[in-house]
C-alpha cells in the first residue's frame, strides 16, 4: 500500500486552479481538479485501492500522479511495526498478552510518541520508503563506545541514547582520574547541582534507563568489555598508542579533538584502509598553513567547551554517528550509501563566534602518511 509521507502539504499556486503538493525541497504541480481530489484523498488516509475504485477517479490519472509522487520520493510503501526488545518477563503467557496490548500499554504509547520525531527525520532520507521504521529499529543493534571526559562526551552519550542507540557506553577507563562529578559537569546534559560528588559512571547507567528511546533488553550486558564496538568516538586529544591500535586492527572511529582557543573540530570519521586518517588531516593542515609544529604558551588544562558550543558540537557529532549507523543499515541502498560517503574524508571546524557557519574541510589521503598500505 502506498501513502503520502508525513509532512507533505498542499499549497495553492499563484496560477488559478493550480496547486503544489510536497515540501519546500520536493514538490509536484497539481493542475487539474481530478488530481486535487486524488491528492486530498491520499492526504486523508484513503488507500490506493479505494481511490482506484472510486467512480470520481480515472485510474490512469491516479496512476500517473502516484508515479510522479514516487519519482519525487513523496510516497511510503507498507510501513512495518517498530521492533523492540521483550519487556514483559513472566511465566504466564496470558499475563504477557494482557500487559502488552498496545491499547492499554502506556509504555508502548509513550514509545510511539517519542519515536514520531525520529521517524519524521529518517523518513525523509533519500531511498527510505517504509516510514523510517527499519533504520530506527536497527539503531538498537549498534554499539558505540565513547572515550573522553569533557562536556561533549557527556552530552553525546545522552543524545545517542535518546536517538535510539541503546548500546551507547563509555570506555572502562573513562574518568579514571576524576570518577566523581565536579563543578564543570553542572548543567551538562542531565547533570544537576545535587549530583556533585556522585560517581559519574553510576549516573550514566541510571540515565541509560531514563533516557533510552527503546526499552532496554534485560538479557543484554551493555558494559561487556569483550564486545567489539561498531564505532569508537574519542573526545579530546588521543593517546598515540590507542590511535595506532585502532588503525592496525581496522577499528572504525570518529575523532572530536580537544578545542583550541575559540574553535572546535569534529572528525575525521576514519575507516582504516578505506578513508583518509587523522594523520592525513594533520599533515595537510601543516602544509596549507606553512608550519612544522606549534607550541602552546597557555595550555588549557581543562580543555573544556563553553556550554552553548558543547551542546552544538555534540549535536553535530551525534548527527555524524547516526548517519553512520543508518547508512550501515541501508548498505544495499545506493542513495543512502552515496550520502554517507560524503562523511568520509572531511572534518567540520566550528568557530565559537560563528556557530551558525560551520566550515567543512575536505581531507585527501596524504602521500607521506601511508595509512592506505
Image (tube, rainbow, N blue to C red):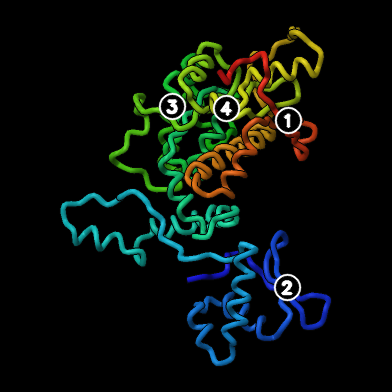
The mark that comes first in sequence, 1 or 2, is 2
Residue shown at 43% from the left, 41% from the top? 166
Q: Which residue is under mark 1?
A: 361
- Taking 345 as reference, is 216 left or right? left
The mark that comes first in sequence, 3 or 4, is 3
Q: Is mark 1 on a helix, strand or loop?
A: strand
- Marker disc for residue 29: 2
The mark that comes first in sequence, 3 or 1, is 3
- The Cα atoms of the two marked residues, 1 and 2, are separated by 38 Å
- Marker disc for residue 201: 3
- The Cα atoms of the two marked residues, 3 and 4, are separated by 27 Å
Residue 248 in picture, x, y percent from top left: 48, 17
- Taking 122 as reference, is 345 left or right? right
Q: Residues within 10 Å of mark 1 (few under 14, many from 20)?
A: some
Query: Which of label 2 and label 3 is nearer to you?
Result: 2
Query: Which of label 3 and label 4 is nearer to you?
Result: 4
Question: Is the residue 324 above or below the residue 89 in the image?
Answer: above
Q: Residues within 10 Å of mark 3 (few under 14, many from 20)?
A: some
Q: What element carries label 2?
A: strand
Q: Which residue is under mark 4?
A: 270
Residue shown at 46% from the left, 63% from the top? 79
Callout 2 touching callout 3 (CB < 8 Å): no
Q: Is mark 4 on a helix, strand or loop?
A: strand
- The Cα atoms of the two marked residues, 2 and 3, are separated by 55 Å
Residue 153 in picture, x, y percent from top left: 55, 29
Q: Residues within 10 Å of mark 4 (few under 14, many from 20)?
A: many
Q: Residues within 10 Å of mark 2 (few under 14, many from 20)?
A: some
Residue shown at 55% from the left, 12% from the top? 240
Residue shown at 40% from the left, 60% from the top? 81
Callout 4 touching callout 2 (CB < 8 Å): no
Quarter of the figure with the C terminus: top right
Amino acid at each position: 500500500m502506498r501513502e503520502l509521507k508525513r509532512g507533505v502539504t498542499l499549497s495553492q499556486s499563484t496560477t488559478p486552479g493550480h496547486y503544489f503538493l510536497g515540501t519546500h525541497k520536493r514538490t509536484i504541480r497539481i493542475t487539474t481538479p481530478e488530481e486535487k481530489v486524488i491528492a486530498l484523498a491520499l492526504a486523508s488516509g484513503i488507500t490506493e485501492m479505494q481511490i482506484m475504485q472510486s467512480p470520481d477517479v480515472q485510474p490512469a490519472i491516479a496512476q500517473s500522479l502516484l508515479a510522479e509522487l514516487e519519482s519525487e520520493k513523496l510516497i511510503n510503501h507498507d510501513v512495518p511495526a517498530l521492533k523492540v526488545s521483550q519487556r514483559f518477563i513472566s511465566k504466564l503467557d496470558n499475563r504477557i498478552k494482557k500487559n502488552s496490548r498496545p491499547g492499554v500499554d502506556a509504555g508502548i504509547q509513550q514509545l510511539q510518541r517519542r519515536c514520531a520525531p525520529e521517524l519524521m527525520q529518517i523518513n525523509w532520507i533519500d531511498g527510505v520508503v517504509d516510514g523510517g521504521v527499519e533504520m530506527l529499529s536497527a539503531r538498537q543493534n549498534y554499539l558505540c563506545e565513547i572515550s573522553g571526559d569533557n562536556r561533549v562526551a557527556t552530552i553525546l552519550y545522552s543524545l545517542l541514547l535518546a536517538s535510539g542507540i541503546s548500546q551507547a557506553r563509555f570506555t572502562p577507563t573513562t574518568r579514571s582520574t576524576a570518577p566523581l562529578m565536579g563543578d564543570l559537569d553542572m548543567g551538562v546534559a542531565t547533570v544537576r547541582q545535587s549530583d556533585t560528588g556522585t560517581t559519574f559512571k553510576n549516573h550514566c547507567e541510571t540515565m541509560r534507563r531514563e533516557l533510552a528511546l527503546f526499552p532496554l533488553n534485560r538479557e543484554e550486558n551493555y558494559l561487556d568489555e569483550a564486545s567489539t564496538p561498531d564505532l569508537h568516538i574519542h573526545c579530546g586529544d588521543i593517546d598515540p598508542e590507542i590511535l595506532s591500535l585502532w588503525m592496525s586492527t581496522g577499528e572504525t572511529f570518529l575523532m572530536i579533538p580537544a578545542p583550541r582557543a575559540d574553535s572546535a573540530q569534529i572528525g575525521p570519521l576514519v575507516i582504516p584502509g578505506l578513508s583518509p586518517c587523522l594523520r592525513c588531516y594533520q599533515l595537510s593542515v601543516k602544509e596549507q598553513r606553512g608550519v612544522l609544529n606549534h607550541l602552546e604558551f597557555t595550555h588549557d588544562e581543562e580543555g573544556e567547551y563553553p556550554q552553548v558550543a558543547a551542546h552544538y558540537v555534540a549535536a553535530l557529532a551525534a548527527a555524524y554517528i547516526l548517519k553512520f549507523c543508518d547508512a550501515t543499515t541501508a548498505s544495499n541502498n545506493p542513495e543512502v550509501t552515496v550520502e554517507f560517503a560524503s562523511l568520509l574524508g572531511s572534518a567540520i571546524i566550528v568557530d565559537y563566534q560563528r556557530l551558525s557557519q560551520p566550515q567543512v574541510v575536505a581531507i585527501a589521503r596524504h602521500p607521506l602518511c601511508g595509512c592506505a598500505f
